Every structure is written in C-alpha cells, then in structure tokens.
Image (spheres, rainbow, N blue to C red):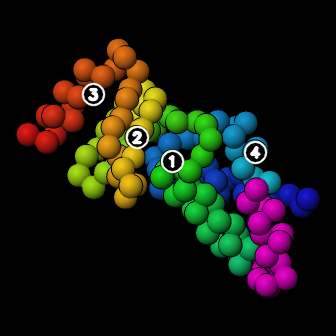
Amino acid sequence: MPVTNTDRILKDMFSRLLNIGLPQDLIEKLVPVVDGVLDRMQGNFDPETVQGQNMMRALLCSMVAHGWGLGMHPHNNPGLNLDGDAIEVRVCKDILLPMEDIKSLRYIKKDADGRVKKALFEPDQNARIRQHIEAILS
C-alpha cells in the first residue's frame, strides 16, 4: 500500500471535530480502513491530483470521526477531550450525560417503539446518575 498522510488527516479530524486525541495504536488500525475504502472507490472516483485524493481522505476521516463521536465504535471511550473537559453524550433529545455515566450503563429495556423504558447502571452509580438527571429535568 502506498505511503499516505491518512494518519495525519485522522489526527486532525478527531482533534477538530471531536476535540479528542487518538492513541497511535488506534490510528494504525483506522488508517487501513480509510485507505481500503479509498482503494475500493478508485473505479468510481478517479481524482487526477494529490489534492483530490487528500480531499477524499479528509472526507472519509471526517465521516469516521463523526461516527466515532456518535458512539459507533467498539472501544476507546475517552472521558475527557483535549481541553480536559468531560465529554458529554446525548442520550435523548433533552438530556446530556457525562461519558463516565454512559460507561456505567449496564442494561437498557426498550418499549415496542424503541424508546428506553428502563436503564440500569452499576450499583454504585445509580444514585449519582438519578440526581444528575433529576437536576436537569427540574
């Protein structure tokens, strides 16, 4: 596989879009994914310049970063962004929870419409999370 600057673009996208830094081992796992998609698209997408190829890499990396930020990843749930602030995750239309609360989630029961009916957290976290949600709702 040719040498690309996908790793640099991934770092920039995660930093700019999500304000988080990725460990090098994760970048090394994501680079072949982005480059592989680009290789498969060569038949349909044929940029004639290096700038066009880098633009496509940037688009793919931004898609990966957005998906990552929405929780579409199997691991690496950082609790803090690059500024040291707690990362909050939107769990419904009006409630934001810190990442540490989401990490303590252990069970969700949904109703027939797919809405959360019941959520269980780690036992030591239940009281703290309930207080946080009640404070938001009041």
Q: Position of residue 82 (x, y in %)?
A: 46, 38
For numbered disc 4, what is the local secondary structure?
A: helix
Query: Quick check: 64 above or below 71?
Result: below
* Secondary element at image label 2: strand
Which residue appears at 73% of the width and 60% of the height? 34
Q: Is residue 12 magenta?
A: no
Q: Label 4: how many residues lie within 10 Å, few (<14), some (14-19) or many (20+)?
A: few
> Does residue 70 lie above or below 56 as drawn?
above
Task: Give the residue pinned by disc 3.
Answer: 129
- Mark 1: amino acid: Gly
**Residue occupied by mark 2:** 109
Mark 2 vs 3, N-terminal side: 2
Residue depicted at x 34% and y 20%? 125
Give the numbered dot on residue 71.
1
Q: Nearer the viewer, residue 6 or 113?
A: 113
Name the residue that disc number 4 marks: 29
Mark 2 to mark 3 CA distance (whole Å): 17 Å
Specify which label sits upstream in the sequence, 3 or 1.
1
Residue 19 image point, x, y percent: 46, 46
Q: How many marks?
A: 4
**In this rendering, which labeled residue sits more in front, label 1 or label 2?**
2
Q: Where does residue 106 sit, x and y in percent of width and height?
A: 46, 29
In the figure, 138 relative to 62: above or below? above
Q: Position of residue 49 (x, y in %)?
A: 77, 81
- Helix, strand or loop status at disc 3: helix
Residue found at the far right of this picture: 1
Callout 4, which amino acid? Lys
